[in-house]
Amino acid sequence: MKIAIVGPGAMGCLFAAFLSKTDADIVLIDKDSQRAEKINQQGIIVEGVSGSWQAKVKVTSDIKDIGALDLILLCVKSYDTKSACAQVKLLAGENTLVLTLQNGIGNIEILGEIIGQDKIIAGITNLGSTLIGFGHINHAGFGETIIGRMDNKLPAGMRSIREVFNKAGLDTRISRDIKGLLWSKLVINAGINPLSAITRLKNGRLVEAEPARKILRETVTEVVKVIKRKRIKLIFDDPLAKVEAVCEATAGNVSSMLQDVLNNKRTEIDFINGVVVRMAQELGVPAPVNSFLVELVKTIEISYGLSLK
């Protein structure tokens, strides 16, 4: 199988490193040619729960000579999906599948409009990874990766993806309810990400500090009301208990949105709580806490580089 991974961030590097252990032909695509050259020279450096090791992976910013692909794995930030589609469209042949493991809601629709819905596979991953430097990651945690089609079809290529991911040590399964999984993950992300980014607390602290826990509960309650109005079935019966359990299970984790804030980077707030706010407005469902969190995170983004003078 020939696989291109678009995006050399924490998750892109983690998947590239693990997939390099198989006989699959892996190429990591980076829009920054200088960064691509550096990662080419040093390889991908992995630390954390899987030990300290290094993976040699081909990295390029030039897609002209990549050739036919079986799979394109999209690991860019949600706000870069549309611009990444230009590359993906050039790389996607007649039999190429495109798998998105991105955060939030809306990426599948963007990809489907530009590339074609029949080529898109949706997925979620519970793997944990933090970017330390160019091609240098901390593997923060193992977890299941689940993939599926929004139309519930099971093309043969999807089984091949599952097989090669499992061979790489990436626990992967196929689901016929990927929509429910995506929205279930949104509940968790919406509860944890903005609150951690604003407070700069690790996941576990969000449920240890009672004021933060109260905000988390109010946030999740609003999200669930929107989901119920949309008649989407979640994969867990008690969303509040699930989000709090995830906080406890990942107590030492720095959420992806907090990582962005600490690095003065744009966050994915528009694709997480922002989606909830927009849908709440369309449905006539109040979502004041989510709306307030969105505005606070956007204010933090505006503050980057500003002094107190």
Image (cartoon, rainbow, N blue to C red):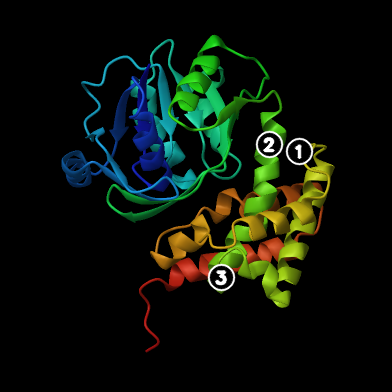
**Residue 133 seen:** yes
Q: Is residue 56 left or right of residue 257?
A: left
Mark 1 residue type: Ile
Q: Is residue 242 left or right of residue 157?
A: right
Q: Residues within 10 Å of mark 1 (few under 14, many from 20)?
A: some
Mark 3 residue type: Leu
First in sequence: mark 1 vs mark 2:
2
Mark 2 residue type: Leu
Residue in the picture at 52% in, 43% down = 142
Instruction: Indicate which disc residue 181 carries.
Output: 2
Instruction: Indicate which disc residue 50 carries.
Output: none
Rendered-image quadrant of the N terminus: top left
The CA distance from mark 1 to mark 2 is: 6 Å
The picture places residue 238, in percent across and down from the top left corner, at 82, 50
The CA distance from mark 3 to mark 1 is: 27 Å
Residue nearest the viewer, comparing 298 with 46: 46
Residue in the picture at 58% in, 59% down = 193
Q: Which residue is mark 1?
A: 235
First in sequence: mark 3 vs mark 2:
2
The residue at the far front in this view is 51
Residue in the picture at 66% in, 30% down = 178
Q: Residues within 10 Å of mark 2 (few under 14, many from 20)?
A: many
Q: Which residue is mark 3?
A: 201
The picture places residue 122, in percent across and down from the top left corner, at 57, 30
The residue at the far bottom in this view is 309
Q: Is residue 70 above or below residue 292?
A: above
The CA distance from mark 3 to mark 2 is: 26 Å
